[in-house]
Amino acid sequence: MTQLRPVVGTPDEYDLDDSNRVPWILGTHLHPEVGPLDRAPSESRVCMVESHGFARRKPYHHHKLTLVFAAMRRVRDELREAGYEVEYVQAETFQEGLATYFDRHPDDTLVAMRSPSHRSGDRFADLVDAVGGDLELVGNELFCSTRAAFDEWADGETDAFRHEGFYRWMRRESGVLLREDGTPVGGEWNLDEDNREFPPDDWEAPPVYEPELGDLTAEVSEWVAAEFDTWGSTEDFAWPVTREEALAALDHFVAERLPEFGPYQDAMRADDPAMAHALLSPAVNLGLLHPWEAVIAIEDAYRSRDDVPLNSAEGAIRQFLGWREFMRHVYRHAMPDLAEASQLGADRPLPEFFWSGETDMACVGGSVGDVYDRGYSHHIQRLMVLSNFATLWGVDPAELNEWFHATYVDAYHWVTTPNVVEMGSYGSGVFATKPYVASANYVDRMSDYCGDCAYDPDRSTGKGACPFNALYWDFLARNEDDLRSNHRMGLLYGHVDDKRDDCEMDEIYQRVSELRTMEREGEL
């Protein structure tokens, strides 16, 4: 049987044999075979608190709230069918819900896995204490590594906050995609350079798994629309809300989509937001699916099938075993400063078209449209279109982070903050070695957006020139004091110097001024 515990590091040792030690299942800890619930005897009591107050704080995507509440209620029903006594409390706040629970069961001690969000454990402990209850926090087992294992490794590792070193360590410690001598299968640790092809015109993306919309989920969707001020489409919800559906989604990805994933991982097509991506992050981040289950399924497929190339298997495993784990550890070490970091001094408000989608930039409008429709776009749209534009524009990283947190179905503070503030906005420098910014040339090379766009990707100035180009050179110029000394930016500043010598920068500044006026007037 698959071990559904962290495989790097030693999980906490504890039991729930005492009937008054009760699992508290959070809305992102829904896996029945992990943590306190896995250790609880059958037919024992389980605490679940459905808090509504958080959903009123942001204009969350309708699909995101539907997903969270439907998944919690489906887990509640399945546990009851399995014989558990589920005390499912619905309340405006967690404190009110916990007060209700302890009024009913004053002698209980709740046992919960730590949430990865900053200081959430302290906040939950304070809430339980305020209502006179008892709480025990244990390690979060919905990751492939423990906090203690990372901290021990990082303490003696000079490049601990560099993903490549971390990823190689995780591969060595877990044994994934290794040969008998401990070297990587294929001879290379990272095949990212083999993930950057654009598909031919006749390529058809493999089919997407879409579970049926059950009665409970439909009811939750209608309730969410009536109860909360949401953003995004209320139609076409198609995300797994049960453990069974999450496993089916994993099986479908491995069987149908994994072979095509690798080469086209970074490509973007206007009519195909899914491409061959796994679409598993919502289920994993809710806890319906353990990341280790995905890792071993992908590795098994590579080793047993001829149609799964190494760059597909390694690229997918890198997301689950490498990047997701790395984000978790970076977040907890860099918080709370990371959330408000803006080392380049970016402080502009987020343009309105991130909410409306009304812009003539095909890549930005199309990506926002994808998020509006499903609460999802894949990682290159997130990084090299949406975050790229916001960074070039000078958007406050914290405001951009709030937008991602609210609008994506797989977004939680612990995962968006390092991805958006650091990777997307170069806000801190805790692990990013340069800003991930690019001109229209990148978008044109990796997508089909530019073909039907109102803007010309080959021009930087003048009417109709793509905004990405002038904004790119303007970004480099205005951040020169911070970035010129970066050894990875030297060649780019040589081009800035050339443009200054040719007096081209004056035209670029003029174009940027025009773009900012167009944005204010809703004409960009």
Image (tube, rainbow, N blue to C red):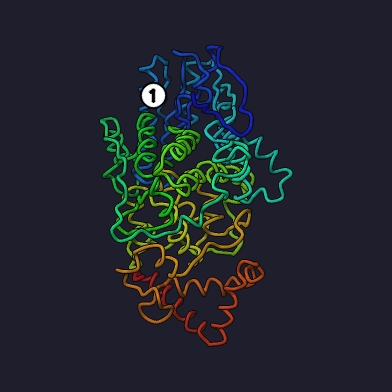
Is residue 285 in view from this perspective? no
Residue at the location (58% across, 24% down)? 135
- Answer with left or right where residue 519 lies relative to residue 180: left
Quadrant of res 454 = bottom left
Where does the image place residue 192, in percent across and percent down from the top left? 51, 54
Where does the image place residue 56, in percent across and percent down from the top left? 41, 42
Is residue 25 in view from this perspective? yes
Toward the right, the furthest residue is: 156
| In the rendered image, the vertical position of residue 442 relative to residue 105, given as above or below | below
Q: Which of 158 and 365 is in front in this view?
A: 158
Residue at the location (54% across, 26% down)? 112
Residue at the location (56% across, 46% down)? 327
Q: Helix, strand, or loop for circle 1?
A: helix
| In the rendered image, the vertical position of residue 337 relative to residue 104, given as above or below | below
| In the rendered image, the vertical position of residue 9 relative to residue 44, given as above or below | below
Quadrant of res 434 = bottom right
Q: Which of 498 and 307 is in front in this view?
A: 307
Mark 1, Cα crowd under 10 Å, few <14 / some 14-19 / many 20+, is many
Residue at the location (50% across, 34% down)? 292
Where does the image place residue 223, in percent across and percent down from the top left? 30, 36
Quadrant for the C terminus in the image: bottom left
Name the amino acid type tagged 1: Arg
Q: How many labels does the image show?
A: 1
Where does the image place residue 472, in percent across and percent down from the top left? 49, 71
Q: Which residue in the structure is indicated by mark 1?
A: 76
